[in-house]
């Protein structure tokens, strides 16, 4: 008997910059990623999303594959500069038409769209004009963009989320310098993060004011950091990591306020976030309808007296990354008994059940969608067939972990593996594959179904039983 409710959504996810390509087609403006990925030394072997999977030109073929897979929902993001090349003002109707046609094509195949408004591809024009997320003007700009999307697509789309993984685009953009705008300025980062929360609240408010029928949520990483030992220093480091990864990112959108202890810490150390009159009320009055959870791995946390920085493994050579941590606060350490991917991500399905439990414990019964989960690997090709059995094993165990959370009473409504099709991994290039569909980059980007495609078809048909 399936543990999954009858109307459970079985989907898959992508994001605009990683899948669309056509980076300057038909009036699209440049995003910060279009610019950043062309700077020397920013991405693995200089890879970028100029072409990606060329989904922009091939979306009909891709939607046909989604339908064949049996997907009942598709999570994708809108590229802000494709619809508003300057970030605000003049609308690019060709960009609107692309998303409108994509939505119609999905609906024709009974696939329910789930739109992410912001999956990191900020219009470069807004970065140049007022410093992007660091400028308070971004709140009005994001609201204008969100309203445009609701107005044009809200008649056909009823599942929306405002932001994807703020910890990553703010953390890596403003703290570690590995994403645009390449800064290492915690004070600015904390303020930029405040603008994200305000933008979320304003966009939620507009959604309701405009009477859009549907639900609007916020997508976060679900990083269940466990302490490496039960020693008080490691436990304290873990509490701080939890405070940053979870409480700081979830409280403002689910409780409408910052966690008091973390807020005091930030204000004591950096004097931010700076509140304007009305900010606290805006957050309080506009909490989201659901939370989207992205889960890939567990991270173990320890006290940290030495490591400063986040030196990632972006090559897929085990052990090639350096240390990761904020000195004096916490560091990420390897679990000696853990099973790791080639990118040194710990495979730990139980963590998904646990972490859903922790979210319920802190926030009560909030509707949950698992908006990303997947295995990044260099898939073996044997006699032309893409044999991604490790992906099947990974997803199968994680689906069971979601099933257990549902048995425990969690209101999980959908599961979206990352990713529908092979696409660009931000810093790791095209070699780190996640899709059910392989792209032959030597052969005109031809699509090919992987072993996991057939397997996921069965999962969907049996509502999670396989
Ligand atoms: C999440 C992002 C996705 C995707 C995924 C896999 O953080 O929301 O866009 O990229 O991680 O990560 P990576 O591509 O770094 O392996």
Image: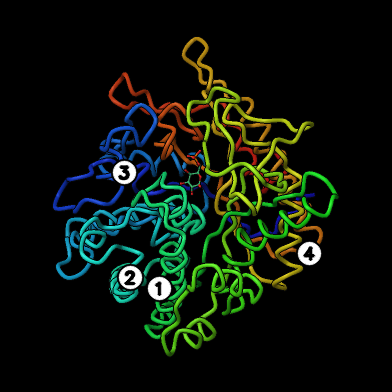
Cα distance in 3D space between marks 2 and 1: 6 Å
Taking the view exactly as shown, the residue that stands out farthest to the right is: 230
Q: Badge 4 is on which residue?
A: 409
In terms of sequence position, does the residue under pointer 4 or pointer 2 come before the other? 2
Cα distance in 3D space between marks 3 and 2: 21 Å
Q: Quadrant of the C terminus?
A: top right
Say if mark 3 contacts mark 1, CB within 8 Å.
no
In terms of sequence position, does the residue under pointer 3 or pointer 1 come before the other? 3
Give neighbour class at mark 1: few <14, some 14-19, many 20+ (Cα, 10 Å): many
Q: Tell me the mark number nearer the camera, choosing from 4 and 2.
A: 2
Q: Secondary structure at mark 1?
A: helix
User: In this view of the protein, which residue sits in the foreground, 350 or 114?
Assistant: 350
Q: Is residue 444 above or below residue 354?
A: above
Q: Is residue 385 left or right of residue 55?
A: right
**Residue 405: percent from left, percent from top:** 76, 56
Instruction: Say which mark, if any, is on residue 142.
Output: 2
Q: Secondary structure at mark 4?
A: loop
Identity of the residue drawn at 24% across and 57% down:
81
Q: Residue 83 is drawn in which quadrant?
A: bottom left
Q: Badge 1 is on which residue?
A: 199
User: In this view of the protein, which residue sits in the foreground, 388 or 122?
Assistant: 122
Q: Is residue 20 left or right of residue 358?
A: left
């Amino acid at each position: 008997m399936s543990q999954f409710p009858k109307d459970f959504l079985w989907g898959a996810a992508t994001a605009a910059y990683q899948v669309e390509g056509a980076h300057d087609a038909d009036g699209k403006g440049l995003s910060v990623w279009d610019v950043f990925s062309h700077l020397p030394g920013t991405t693995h072997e200089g890879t970028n999303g100029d072409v990606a999977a060329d989904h922009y030109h091939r979306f009909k073929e891709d939607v046909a594959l989604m339908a064949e897979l049996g997907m009942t929902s598709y999570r994708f993001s809108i590229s802000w500069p494709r619809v508003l090349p300057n970030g605000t003002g003049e609308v690019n109707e060709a960009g609107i038409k692309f998303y409108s046609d994509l939505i119609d094509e999905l609906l024709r195949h009974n696939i329910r769209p789930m739109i992410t408004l912001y999956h990191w591809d900020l219009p470069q024009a807004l970065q140049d004009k007022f410093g992007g997320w660091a400028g308070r003007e971004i709140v009005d700009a994001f609201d204008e963009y969100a309203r445009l999307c609701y107005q044009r697509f809200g008649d056909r789309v009823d599942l929306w989320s405002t932001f994807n993984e703020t910890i990553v685009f703010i953390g890596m953009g403003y703290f570690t310098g590995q994403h645009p705008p390449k800064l290492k300025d915690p004070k600015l980062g904390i303020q930029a993060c405040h603008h994200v929360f305000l933008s979320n609240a304003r966009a939620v408010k507009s959604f309701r004011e405009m009477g859009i029928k549907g639900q609007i949520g916020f997508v976060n990483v679900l990083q269940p950091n466990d302490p490496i030992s039960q020693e008080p220093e490691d436990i304290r480091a873990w509490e701080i990591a939890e405070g940053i990864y979870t409480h700081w990112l979830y409280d403002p959108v689910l409780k409408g306020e910052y966690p008091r202890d973390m807020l005091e810490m930030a204000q004591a150390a950096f004097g931010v976030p700076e509140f304007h009159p009305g900010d606290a009320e805006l957050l309080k009055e506009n909490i989201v309808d659901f939370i989207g959870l992205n889960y890939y791995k567990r991270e173990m946390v320890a006290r940290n007296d030495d490591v400063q920085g986040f030196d990632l493994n972006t090559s897929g050579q085990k052990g090639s990354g350096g240390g990761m941590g904020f000195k004096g606060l916490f560091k990420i350490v390897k679990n000696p008994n853990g099973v790791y991917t080639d990118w040194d991500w710990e495979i730990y399905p139980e963590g998904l059940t646990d972490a859903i439990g922790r979210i319920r414990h802190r926030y009560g019964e909030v509707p949950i969608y698992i908006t990303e989960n997947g295995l990044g690997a260099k898939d073996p090709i044997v006699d032309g067939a893409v044999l991604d059995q490790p992906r099947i094993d990974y997803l199968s165990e994680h689906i069971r972990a979601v099933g257990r959370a549902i048995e425990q009473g969690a209101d999980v409504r959908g599961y979206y593996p990352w990713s529908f099709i092979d696409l660009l991994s931000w810093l790791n290039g095209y070699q780190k594959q996640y899709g059910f569909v392989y792209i032959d980059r030597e052969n005109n980007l031809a699509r090919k179904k992987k072993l996991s495609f057939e397997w996921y078809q069965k999962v969907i048909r049996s509502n999670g039983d396989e």
